[in-house]
Image (cartoon, rainbow, N blue to C red):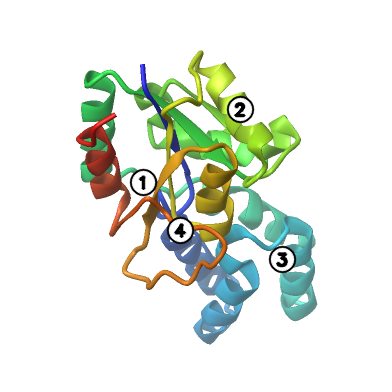
Amino acid sequence: MPLLLLDLDNTLVDRDAAFRAALLDFLAEHGLPEAGIDWLMAVDAGGYTPRPKVARAMYERYGGRVARETVLTLLDRGAADRVVLSAPVRTALEKAATAGWTLAIVTNGRTAQQERKIRVTGLDALTHGWAVSEAVGHKKPAPEIFHTAAVTVGARLDGAWVIGDSPHADIAGAAGIGARSVWVSGGRPWTGTAHTPTRTALDAASAIDSVVGAPG
């Protein structure tokens, strides 16, 4: 069966929206100015800033009013507890599985946090398995994490497609394993330089549909 390798954060689920909601609750709960939301989102950088660095920046800014443990809990559970799977993405995944595709999630991040997102959204029942960088010991775009995902679901990388929102992690990662790719743009212009996606889609649902309907 053909293999579809899927990014998690800001591809299958809107991680940034979930994290923003968690931050707004955090600011309100502790009587902190809501104007700090843009600074917090910038520090987080879509989840790419290492957790210890985000925690340190937050504690330096809010440490006099917020306990360190509270900050760490926010970073551990905030987005994971709030992510949702949209109906169009759910439907696209179901159609792909019905069409005979093997579906594997490939995500950078900490295992406990990423697996919580997968289970909270029901993606554990919609996909055949996943590979998380912390558990694998390699981050995208390293080929090793894609190879691990393929082995986990009992599939081969020959003929695989990669879908994701990151030019570096996903599109370059696809090029590194000789796979075709779909960049989920979210309306952004393409700014990558080293590698170009096979195609571009506005969102994950249309990206999945385009692959499932593509010739082998």
Mark earlier in primary sequence (3, 1): 3
Task: Classify 32 as above or below 183.
Answer: below
Mark earlier in primary sequence (4, 1): 1
Q: Residue 84 carries which label?
A: 1
Residue 176 screen position, x and y as percent: 60, 43
Q: In the image, what residue type sits under mark 4?
A: Thr
Q: Which mark is residue 210?
A: none
- Report the residue marked by disc 2: 147
Mark earlier in primary sequence (2, 4): 2
Task: Between label 1 and label 2, give the one nearer the viewer.
Answer: 2
Task: Between label 4 and label 3, give the one nearer the viewer.
Answer: 4
The crowd level at tag 3 (other Cα within 10 Å; few <14, some 14-19, many 20+) is many
Q: What element carries label 2?
A: helix
Mark earlier in primary sequence (1, 2): 1
Q: Is mark 1 on a helix, strand or loop?
A: loop
Residue 43 figure quarter: bottom right
Residue 75 screen position, x and y as percent: 64, 55
Q: In the image, what residue type sits under mark 2?
A: His
Give how far apart the Cα atoms at labels 2 and 4 are: 21 Å
- Report the residue marked by disc 4: 196
Q: Give 32 or 129, whichever is nearer the viewer.
A: 129
The crowd level at tag 2 (other Cα within 10 Å; few <14, some 14-19, many 20+) is some
Residue 59 in the figure: left or right of residue 114: right
Which part of the image, by quadrant, shows the C terminus?
Answer: top left
Q: Which mark is residue 54?
A: 3
Which part of the image, by quadrant, shows the N terminus?
Answer: top left
Q: In the image, what residue type sits under mark 3?
A: Val
Q: In the image, what residue type sits under mark 1?
A: Val
Residue 132 in view (yes/no):
no
Residue 154 in the figure: left or right of residue 11: right
Give how far apart the Cα atoms at labels 4 and 3 are: 31 Å
